[in-house]
Every structure is written in C-alpha cells, then in structure tokens.
Amino acid sequence: MMEATALDAATARSRTRASRRWRGAVVGHLYLAPAIVLTGLFVYWPLVASTVLSFYDWNLVSPMWAAVGWQNYRELIASRAFWMSLVNTGKAAAALTVLTVGVPLLLALAVQRVGPRWRDLYRVVLFSPTVISMAIACAVWLWIFHPLYGVLNTTLRLVGLQGPAWLSSSDSAIWAIILVTVWKTFGFNFVLYIAGLLTIPREMYEAARVDGASERQLVWHVTLPLLAPTTLFVFLSTFILSPQNLFIPTQILTQGGPNEASNNVGYLVYQLGFEYFRVGYASAAATLIFLVFLVLTALQFYLAERRIHYGR
Amino acid sequence: MRFRQGTVLLVAVLGLARSVGAAEPVTIEYWHINSPTFGGPAAKELVQLFEAKHPNIKVVEKFQPGVYTGLMQQLQVSLAAKRPPAVAQIGYNLTAYAAGQFPHVLLDKYRKSDPAFFKGIPDNIMALGVLGGTLHGIPFGVSTPVMYYNADLFKAAGLNADQPPQTWDELQRQGAIIRQKTGKLAVYLQQPNDEWIDQTLIWGNGGRPLSEDGKRIGWDAPEAMEAMQMWQDMVNKSKIAANLTWEEGLQAFLSGHVAMCLTTIGRQEHMRRNATGFQVRAVPVPRFGSKPLATATGGNVLMIFASDPAQEKAAWEWIKFVLSPEGATIWTKGTGYLPPRAELANDPRYLKPFFDEAPLMKAALQTFPYAKPWVSFPGPRGLEITKILIKARDEVLEGKRPAELILKEAAQQANALLPK
Amino acid sequence: MGASARGVHVLLVAACLLVVFPMFWMFSTALKPPPEIFAGTFRLWPSAATLQNFTTALTQVPMLRLFWNSLVVAAVVTAAQILTSALAAYACAILRVPGQRVWFALFVATMMVPSQVTMIPNYLLIARFELLNTYTALIVPQVVTGYGIFMLRQTFKNLPTSLVEAGILDGASSWQVLWRIVVPTTRTALAALSVLFFINTWNQYLWPLLVANDKYMRTLPVGMQEFVSLEGGTNWGPLMAAATMAIVPALLAYVVAQRYVLESFVTAGLKD
C-alpha cells in the first residue's frame, strides 16, 4: 500500500486518503483479475502444456508417447520447411507492415479531407474487405488469381505483360498470399487511424493555422505526432499478428506450396499438428516461433518507447 | 399374491428382453464428407431408410468440411477427447495412418458372422480395406479417375470428338493440334493436396507406388520417372498441359479453356451441371502405349471407432445397410462413386437405369476392373511422405530442374520415413 | 484548394475500385445462374440475374439458425472483450498498479501464441466439462484479448492526467472515474475496437468448427463450408450468396458504430 502511494510522488496533491485507497494495489489487481484468470486459463496453461508436449513424440490419440528430449527442436532447426517459413514470414511481415501501416494512414488522412457525405461512403467502401470472412475472400481471390483468365492476368495482358501462375509458381506464391492478406486486413488499421484522427482536438489545428502553418506542415507537425500512439500500436500489432493473418490464405490458396515456397510460421504449426498429426513437433515449432516473436517485439517496443521519450 | 408374483415375473421378463438389446435405443454418429451437392441428400435418405428399418437405432449424420483430410483432423481431436463418431469415412490415402494410429474396431470377425454381406463385393475391392492382412475398414466410396473432355473444342480443332486419345502418345499428338488450332491448352491433370493422379501415372506405366514389402517408395523407379518426365514436358516443353491448382484447373476446363481434364468420377455431376456451352464427355484415362490400363482408386473406407459394444453393433448394422444393394444404389446415384458391388451396375432393379442416363459414368465402369489401390503409406510418418511427394510433383511441374533429380531426392527423403 | 481536393478524390476513388472489386465479384457471382458462373468470357454482371442461389443457400443450410448463433456469440464476445480489455487497460494505464508492466507484457505476449497451440488444450478442457456444442464453449475461451488490452492501454495512457485528477479531487472512486470520465472520453476508440471485435468473432472459423459442430449450433462460417467440396465440386453460386448475406450484420455493425461515433461528436462538440 505504501509503495503505491510512493508512486504518486509526482502528484503531491493527491496524497489524500481517498487517493491512497483509490490507487491501492488490491483494487488495481481486482480490475486485472478477469484478464489474468482468463488469460492464464485459456492461453498460458495451453502454452505451458504445449511446451511440455514439445519434448514428446505424440499424436494426441495413440496410447503410446515417447519422450524425445530436444529432438523435435533439432529436427526443426534442420528442416527446410522451418527456415523457408521463417524467411517467408519475414518477407510478409515487412510487406504487411509497410502496406498496412502506411497506406491506411494515407487513406484515413485523405478521407478526413473530403466532405461529410463522401466521407461516409469512402469509409464504408474502404472498410468492406474487412467485413467478409477470410475464407470467402480467398475463394473469390482464387478467381482473380487464375493464370488463364483471372482479372489480374487479363489486365496484365492488356498492357502486354505475361502474368505468372500466381499460386503454382514458387516465385509468386508468397506474394499472392501477401496481397490477399493486405487487401483483407488493412481495413482494421484504417478504422483505428480514423478513430485516432477524430480524437485530435480541432483547437490544435486552429492554433497552428493561426501561426501560419500550411496544410502540409499541419499534417507533419500536428497530426502525425498526435497520432503517434495509434501508429505505434498499429505497427506493433500488425507485426505481431502477421502469422495469424497469413494462415487462412495459405491454407486455402496454396497449402504452403509449391514446395514450401509460400509456407509461413502460421501455417507451419498447423501443418505439423493437423496434417501430419505430429503434435509434439508442432508444439516445438510453436514454442520457437513464440520466443522469436517475443524477442523481436520486445526489441521494437523498447526502441519505440525510447524514440517517443526522446522525441518529446 | 399371484398378482404380485405375476407382476414381478412380467417385469423380470421385460427387463430380460431389454438387456438382450431389443428395445434399448442407441444413437450413433456417422461422419461423412458429403456436401449438399455431393451426396448430402443421399446420406440423409440413407439415414431415413435405415432408421425405419431399425427403430431402436438413431443415426446422427455429420458433414465434415475439408474433405477427407478435414475429417481426419476432426477425428483426431475427437479421439483425443474420447468422443469419436461411431463410424466415419476415411479416405484411402489416410487409411494406413488411421489403421495404425487411431484406436478402432477390427472387422475380420464379421466375416464369420455375416458371410452373406461379404459375398458380392469383389476381392480386389475388399482388399482396399485390408492392411497387413487385417480388415480395418469396409470400402464404401470407390472412384476412379477418368478423362473428361470438351467435345466442342475437339471439333473446333478438326479432331474427331468420338475418338479421343486412348494412349499418352495419342494425347500428346492430338493435344498439340488442339493447341495449335484453337490456342487453348490441351490437358489438365489434377493437382490436389494428394498424389492420386501421380499414383495413377505410376501404376499405368507399370510401376508400383510402394514396394511389396512396404520399404521402398516407387517414385524413383524408371517407370515412375518416365511418367513424371512426360508430365513435366507436357507442361514445360510442348506446353500442352496446364500447371494449375486443382480448383483453378477444374474451373479452366469448365470454362472451356482446357480441352481435357483428368480428375475423379466423383465430379461428374458437377461437370455436367456447370460446363458452360459445351458438351462434356468422358473416357478412361490414357494408357501408356501397349501397357494395360491401371488407375489408383479413390474414395473411402468406413471404419468403426466406437468403443461401446452397443454402438459398435449399431455401426455395423449401418455399414451393412449402406452397402446393401438398396443402400449402394442410393449412394452411387447421389455421389457418382461406383458401387462396391459391381453387379449392381447391370441390374435393372438397381443401377442400370442410372448408368444408362449418366454417360460419364460409363468411363468409370470401364476403368473399374483395372482399379489398383491408392497406396497409403504405413507408419506414423506416412502423412509426411504424402507431402514430400506432392512437393516433388509441384517442383517437377515448375520445370526448373529435371524430373529425375527431384524424384530421386524425394524418394530418398520418403524412404527414410518409412518404418523399417 | 480545389485541385488538391480533386486529387484526394482521385486517390480515394482509385483505392475504392481496387478494394471493392473482389466484393463486387462475389456479389455478381451470387446473382449468376449456375451455367454462367464458369463462363469462359469474363462477365462482370450476369446476363440474367437471379435470386436462385440465395434461395438454395437458405434451404440447404439452416441459415437463420446459423445467423442467430453467430449473432449471439459475436455480440456477447464483443461486449466481454471490451469490458475485460477496458478493466485491464485501466489498471495498467491509469491506476498504474505495481507490476503493471509485467502484466501488460504478459497480455501482449498472448498475441504471439499461435492459435493452434491454444485450440487443442482448450477443446479438451471444454470436452471434459461436457460443454461441447454450447454457447459457453463458443464464448468463454475468447473473452480476453491481448489486442484489446494493448490498444486501450495506449488510448488511456494518452488521456490528459488533469481529467483523471479532477475526478479524484471530486472524491470519485476508481470505478466511477472509469465509467464517468475515462470511458466517455475514449468512446471513439472503444467504438472502433467494438467493431473490430465484432467482425473478428463474426468471421471466426477454426474454433467454432472444433467446439460447435452440431448442425444447429454451428456459426455462419462453419455452416457455409457445406457448399465447399473439393471432391464433388464447390457450389459457388449458393456459397457466394451465403457469403453476401453473411456480410450484412458485420457491415451494419460498422455503419452503426461510425454513425454513433460521428453523431456523438457532432452533438457534443468535437472534443469534450
């Protein structure tokens, strides 16, 4: 209890009894309780169980399971599928981050500048891909990607280019998946940016205009800095969720093929556990991937927080 | 006194009758892959008729998405939770895995108790459910690959639509003409997430997908390499074959962009209904020169996963019913799968009218006697072997390396995963 | 000013066209009679638009029941996720509970756990408690989301401290500050998050497939799979029709949230 009050050194006037009670650790933990309990039960318990499982060779069903020590991990590190998946996920995460962090921001800014009636329409239309289920989206994109008469290649042919066999060619398969994922998920960030933009007080703009700022300076010096927390969240969440988002397109369009060309970590875990039924091996992959993302995210968080503090 | 004794006696007798199993209602789950346009209504009809005949058995039929692989996934999870369905359709290529790794009922004992049932199912068909000398499942769906073709495209190329190619050499010759005269691709061999057509090619060229002793993959045998090289050349050299995913390839055929399509007879209804503006016909798949026709057999076995004796008994009754002449007729009409009881096809009471009206089915009937098993790879890593072979096929068709190299590598990896 | 406004419109229209084409394709396929769906020539609009696919979809699967299931689950999960996220974010960002950074890190880390890892153990848990094929199974395991906690903590942290301090000085309890000050101020973010949660849950497939596979307990995405069969051929027309119908509630949720947020801004003055 005393510790909590010590944290309030900066706000000296709140050293009232009410404040102490207010910021008490017990009360605080009550607010955290539902999240802690449910996360523990439905996420961390399975994660722990899965990590334990990664030291076994089991298919969930057979009454025989063998403890294999680090073998699953060794096999994973030696497997081409694993490295291809990591590389592809890296490519995809980079592309997704650029395209679904930058582009929605641009569009949100653009939408803000048009008249109110147009604004509604644009927002709904631009958001619409997000609304349909990923599985259906992939089914539709299958038509679009068709090498012989799909829209993409037909359009390319009109300008004299020969489009690849998007899903059957090892050079283009991962990009096809990235394209579908970008199309489907940019709407999430779009909405968040719009919400962020709406919370910037008009007075800020007024004040800057009074100071003689041009439109571009307004955006650069008022909008973007005030949007920074949203941008940070969008950036990190897009990065973290990229494996999840890649999964369904991979499952429906290419199943990781041809020859691992489009395999990625989200699909790999599924493949190992649900296609090969090697649950122990899949768990090893999942644990490794979790650790990799944990480290990368912590790093980004740390760098980002530093920049924000120095920026201010 | 006498009244009470009589009542006690009556109750005892009734109790006895119940324990003998006559009146105890049993509910079993039947898992299948029959969507509404692929045998779904047939499955429902079978359930209705069965329940009418067996009032104390209730069958809950459940469609599982994702075809046989999807069903296996659900099955695995349900087995882990100890709530498997009583009976389920297991694709042939997954049978070895299910038989080896999932607890299920062995069916040889029924040969003695129900000999009449087993008569009428040809041995080569029943063998599809036998692994290592034991009967693990009853073959239910039996399909063969056939070659659908676009009669109109043939005519447009100046070819005789009544004489489509019967051998691969013929196909390449006619295919080149089609390509030249119409600009359309000549043929598509299905490229799904399994190696059914690959096995068909290997069997057709005289090879074996798996050695007799189950210790060597047949993909690096000369016959297999020759067949796959041919496929690679058709895609990359003569450019008469399409390299597309399964759904893409079928769509291309249905929209008239590809003249011939090698895929399962199970699709015949879909082909008939969706072919736009041209006449679909079908013939058996091409042979390799003078070698006999040989194809891998697709479809599924019915396996029993129930652990409760009453459920097992009910499941067996269900299996007997759906494979009876009456049941098999409904099933075949609804799916386009062939009836395991071959003679039904010629029986006017059962399937003769259907086959007469479904000309596409004739191709499958002609192939039937030459059906070879769809070899499913034994051991706990069998499913990965399938994946290795699919990856090899994809790489072969991309054409960046010669087929021989790719197949040798794949065979080496696959052999390492086979049980010693 | 005029030229740049037009430039903005051009950009937006171009984006819209790119984005909306697949949706349009889906809708037009839903209206095409079967023979036209596979037509070789590229047809943007059916020559003979028909509602036949819609009636097929409605009769072949119990669409209304699936709709209802999806609706119940999505609504309850959304409310629950907003609630738990807000509570946890509040504790971390405003109450600044000791150790909040650790808890926060743990919550965010859940986003990195592949869903396949959590699915099976959760399924086994549900099965053991005989809760398969119930709304509970569909709802409860998803009630907490790291995404929500992450986002709301960012939002809450960004609130001017004066706001909260004013509340404390007035003698409000933490609960009152949350509901009377913090939530109303951040309702834009909350609305946006609600929409995203709703849509996410509405479109979910893997988990409902596992735990609610009974015909009448399925959700919409699972039920729609009945039209898909790689073996016998996918029934594209009814599938697209079902998909079109499935969009409606999700789109509606977005439109309503957008309206609500905008209107509340217009009436309350841009920022309160």
Image (cartoon, rainbow, N blue to C red):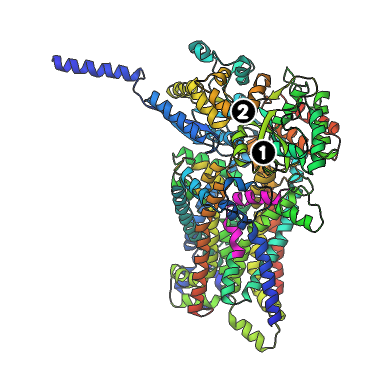
Q: Are marks 2 and 1 on the same chain?
A: no
Q: Is residue B265 left or right of residue C76?
A: right
Task: State the extent of the magenta-drawn residues as a range.
Answer: A125-146
Q: How many residues crowd around disc 2 within 10 Å: few (fewer than 14), some, or many (20 or more)?
A: many
Name the residue nearer the viewer: B86 or A281. B86
Residue occupying the point 70% across, 66% down: A102
Asked where in the image residue C160 lies, by quadrant, the reply is bottom right
Structural distance between the alpha carbons of marks 2 and 1: 38 Å
Q: Closer to us: mark 2 or mark 1?
A: 2
Q: Which numbered marker is on residue B361?
A: 2
Indicate yes or no whether the magenta region holds residue C96: no
Question: CB of mark 2 within 8 Å of CB of mark 1?
Answer: no
Residue occupying the point 58% across, 79% down: A201
Instruction: Give the vertical position of B92 relative to B391 (above or below).
Output: above
Residue A83 in the image: x percent, y percent? 76, 44
Name the image quarter holding the N terminus of chain C: bottom right
Asked where in the image residue A241 lies, by quadrant, the reply is bottom right
